[in-house]
Every structure is written in C-alpha cells, then in structure tokens.
Image: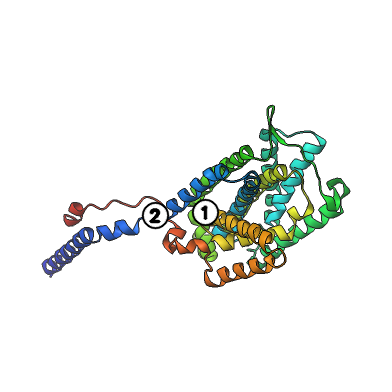
C-alpha cells in the first residue's frame, strides 16, 4: 500500500513537472509580452514634452506652463492621499494656501526670499497643518469614515478661507500683493524659462520620490488600505497611522507647491485656501486618472490647457463646456484618461522581484 502510494506520488510529480516544463516553454513569449510596461513610455513622453515646451512656446505661454507645472505638483499631493490611500480630502487647498501665505509673510515682514529658506518653510507649514488636521480626523479612538474625513477636510478649508478674508494682517479680501521674487544668492527668479525649469526639476524629484514610495512595502500597504481597510487591519497594520502618515506627506507636497505658486504669481489671496481650489485639484486627478501619479500630471495639463483655450475662444459659455467635458469623462471613463493606455494590472503595480523561471530546473524538479 505504501509502495503504491509512493508510486502515485511520483507519477503526480512527474505529471506536474512535465506540465510546468510545457508551460515554461510555451508561455514564455506570452509572459514576456504581458510584462511590457506602458507606464514608463507615458512618463517618458510627458517628460520630453515638458523639457522642450519653453523652447517652442511664446513667453506668455511659458508663464502659463509654469503655473500648470506647479498645479501638477499640487495634484500629485492629492493623488497620493486619495488615489493610493483612499482618503477623500476636500481640503487639500488648506495646505497649499497656508504655505503660500506663510512664505508671503516671510517675504513681506522679514524680507526672507532665499530659495533654501522659503521652500523648506512652505513644506514644513503644509506638513504641520496636515499633521494637525490629520491627527484630529484620523487618529481617533474609532476608525474614521470616508464621509467624516471628507466633510472634516472640507470644513477646515472653508474655515481657513473665512479666516483669511476677515484677518486684516493677512490682507483680508485682497490678500497679500507684490511679493518679492524668490532669490538664490544675488539671482532673482522671475517669470520665464528659468522659473519653469526650476519648478519642473522640483516636480521630477518629487515624482520620483513618490514613485519609489508607492512601489515600496509601504505603498503595498496603502494599496491594500484603499481596497479593504478591515483586512489590512486584520493583518496587523495600524490603518489609521498609515493614513495619517500619507496624509502628512501629501500636505507637505501641497505646501511646497503653494510656496512656488505664491512666488510665481507674486501675490496670495483667500481662494488659495478655499473650497474652490480644493475641488479643482479633485477634478485634475479624476480627469487624468487616480492612483497612477502620472495621471494627476496629465489631468492637470489637459484641464488647464482646455480651460485656457475655451476661455479665450468661448468667453461666455466656456465653464459650461468644460463642465460637460469633465462629466463625460467621469461617466464613460471613471478611471480617467490614463485608462485608455494603461491596464488595470499596471495601475495597481507589481511589488518585489519576480523569481526567474528556468526550464531545465523545472523539468528536473521532484
């Protein structure tokens, strides 16, 4: 009986080994074709277009492109929070605008405009506000619901807007105008190609850091958190702490974007911390595609570009046309425009190195 069972096992192992060998030889081309990555191609195309843009655009369009790149950095912060952690933050402008006001006050009252001081200060301001708000909304005794966090962030953004409008020290309704230019030694960054490439370089660095983050073990936990928070908690992860960490990181990136925006535009105003800008960044990510990083960048460029063209050609009805376009995209492509070229598997991403398959070893496997 034992001998027959041993023979049966050997037969089964032989069948499995032969089947694995066949699969290893015949499915290799299909596997290689399935591993072809579209995302690096899309990122490379966007990078090339961004690098050559000032060389072909007129001066006023270069200024507009700089503003778009800063907003893309802002959209990147929201995509981290919502696209990867599933936190619907309707108050992302709170971190964006508070950092803008902070560096504006540094420039106005203390005459501090050095790039190595104002940009870290703006990032720290965004991080601090995100930690305070995130600690209140996310680190309670019981897990916070999506609606609670959404309304909480929305309330924070609205309260900051009303505070900025009513505080004379912040300029009230008029904001803080005539902000001095950002400096590096004796050089002043004014509107033009120099400011554009500075902002683009910062965006590239932040994008690479975010790409590394979401492809790490921490990013895997975030993806699981977005899909099934209860299961992640069952595995031993502290879901609320993970949310608070990514919420703080998103706030820091938004603060960096707000600092750049304040010096580029030359003034700050209450709308920067308000609900309108918070909703605007949601549309960027929805239009481009959440949970991909590059989708947030593409969505920002397309929405701002279409808005610029429509407002120039259809001045009376351009908001209606833009709203209809956004509605159509959300209805028929809920995963955003990036879903036309990016599959679901690549959107989720792969974590860790895949083991290399050796056909000879598979055939000789016991």
Label of residue 180 in the image: none
Q: Residue at x 70, y 39 (%)?
A: 121
Closer to us: 144 or 25 = 25
Label of residue 294 in the image: 1
How would you rate the neighbour count of disc 2 (Cα within 10 Å): few for under 14, some for 14-19, many for 20 or more?
A: few
Count of numbered circles on the image: 2
Q: Residue at x 56, y 68 (%)?
A: 329
Which quadrant: the N terminus? bottom left
Hey, which residue is sitting farthest right in the picture?
Answer: 168
Instruction: Tell whether 307 sits left or right of 3.
Output: right
- Label 2, label 1: how many angstroms apart (C-alpha)? 14 Å
Q: Residue at x 37, y 50 (%)?
A: 353
Q: Determine the secondary structure under disc 2.
A: loop
Q: Which residue is mark 2?
A: 37
Closer to us: 42 or 76 = 42
At which x and y percent is residue 260?
67, 43
How would you rate the neighbour count of disc 1 (Cα within 10 Å): few for under 14, some for 14-19, many for 20 or more?
A: many
Hey, which residue is sitting farthest top in the picture?
Answer: 186
With respect to residue 265, does 157 lie above or below?
below
Closer to us: 218 or 46 = 46
């Amino acid at each position: 009986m034992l001998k027959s069972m041993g023979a049966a096992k050997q037969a089964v192992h032989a069948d499995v080994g032969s089947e694995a060998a066949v699969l290893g030889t015949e499915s290799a081309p299909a596997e290689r074709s399935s591993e072809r990555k579209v995302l690096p191609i899309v990122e490379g195309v966007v990078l090339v277009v961004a690098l050559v843009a000032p060389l072909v655009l007129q001066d006023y369009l270069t200024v507009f492109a700089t503003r778009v790149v800063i907003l893309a950095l802002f959209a990147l912060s929201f995509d981290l929070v919502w696209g990867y952690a599933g936190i619907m933050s309707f108050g992302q402008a709170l971190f964006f605008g508070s950092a803008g006001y902070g560096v504006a006050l540094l420039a106005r009252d203390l005459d501090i405009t050095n790039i190595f001081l104002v940009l870290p200060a703006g990032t720290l301001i965004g991080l601090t506000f995100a930690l305070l708000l995130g600690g209140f909304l996310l680190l309670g005794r019981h897990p916070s619901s999506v609606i609670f966090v959404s309304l909480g962030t929305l309330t924070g953004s609205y309260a900051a807007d009303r505070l900025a409008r009513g505080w004379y020290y912040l300029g009230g309704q008029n904001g803080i105008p005539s902000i001095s230019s950002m400096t590096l030694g004796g050089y002043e960054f004014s509107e033009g190609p120099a400011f554009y490439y500075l902002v683009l370089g910062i965006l590239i660095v932040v994008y690479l850091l975010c790409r590394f983050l979401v492809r790490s073990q921490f990013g895997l936990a975030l993806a699981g958190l977005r899909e099934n928070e209860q299961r992640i908690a069952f595995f031993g992860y502290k879901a609320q702490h993970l949310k608070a960490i990514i919420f703080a990181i998103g706030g820091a990136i938004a603060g960096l974007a707000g600092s750049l925006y304040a010096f580029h535009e030359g003034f700050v105003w209450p709308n920067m911390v308000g609900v309108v800008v918070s909703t605007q960044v949601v549309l960027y990510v929805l239009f481009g595609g959440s949970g991909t990083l590059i989708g947030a960048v593409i969505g920002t460029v397309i929405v701002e570009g279409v808005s610029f063209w429509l407002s120039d050609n259809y001045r009376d009805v351009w908001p209606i046309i833009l709203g209809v376009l956004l509605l159509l995209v959300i209805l028929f492509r809920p995963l955003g425009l990036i879903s036309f070229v990016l599959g679901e598997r690549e959107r989720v991403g792969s974590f860790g190195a895949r083991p290399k398959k050796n056909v000879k070893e598979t055939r000789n496997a016991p």
